[in-house]
């Protein structure tokens, strides 16, 4: 699984949860701000990403995962190959 594949899969998951098109969203864009997510919606997005990739974001650092790039990097580092 390469970086571009992971990022595209994340875009798909987030798009399904938020019902928004992320095709123009850059890897460094703040997803909460760009998609207008409240805290509950942001948690739903993270939960969906966790489920799809079988990873677990550290509870004490959830607020740090706000961009596609951050999500992608975490998944690449933590997904069992």
Image (spheres, grey):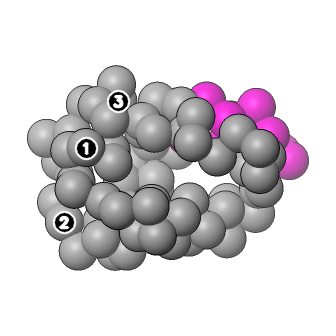
CB under 8 Å between discs 2 and 1 = no
Which mark sits nearer the N-terminus, 2 or 1?
Answer: 2
Query: Could you say where residue 33 lies in the image, as x and y percent from the top left?
Result: 25, 43
Instruction: Give the label on residue 66, or none.
Output: none
**Callout 3: helix, strand or loop?**
loop
Query: Could you say where residue 3 lies in the image, as x and y percent from the top left?
Result: 52, 31
Near mark 1 (Cα within 10 A), the count class, few <14, some 14-19 or many ≥20, is few
Q: Give the range drawn in magenta.
A: 71-81
| Quadrant housing the N terminus | top right
**Callout 1: helix, strand or loop?**
helix
Residue under the point 20% across and 44% down? 34
Query: Could you say where residue 49 lies in the image, as x and y percent from the top left?
Result: 57, 61
Gap in Å between the C-alphas at discs 3 and 2? 16 Å
Q: Residue furthest right?
A: 80
The front one of 34 and 6 is: 34
Near mark 2 (Cα within 10 A), the count class, few <14, some 14-19 or many ≥20, is few
Does residue 41 appear in the picture of this structure?
Answer: yes
**Callout 2: helix, strand or loop?**
loop
Q: Is the magenta stretch mostly helix, strand or loop?
A: helix
Of badges 2 and 1, nearer the viewer stands 1
Instruction: Give the label on residue 20, or none.
Output: 2
Which mark sits nearer the N-terminus, 3 or 2?
Answer: 2
In the image, residue 3 above or below residue 19: above
Position of 46 compared to 37: left or right? right
Gap in Å between the C-alphas at discs 3 and 1? 13 Å
Residue for badge 1: 33
Residue under the point 32% across and 35% down? 30
Residue under the point 57% across and 42% down? 63
For residue 72, what is the image quadrant?
A: top right
Residue for badge 3: 27
Q: Is residue 40 magenta?
A: no
Gap in Å between the C-alphas at discs 2 and 1? 13 Å
């Amino acid at each position: 699984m390469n970086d571009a594949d992971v990022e595209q899969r994340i875009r798909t998951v987030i798009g399904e949860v938020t019902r928004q098109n992320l095709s123009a969203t850059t890897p460094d864009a703040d997803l909460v701000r760009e998609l207008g997510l409240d805290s509950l919606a942001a948690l739903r997005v993270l939960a969906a990403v966790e489920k799809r990739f079988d990873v677990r974001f550290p509870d004490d650092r959830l607020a740090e995962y706000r961009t596609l790039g951050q999500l992608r990097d975490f998944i690449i580092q933590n997904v069992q190959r």
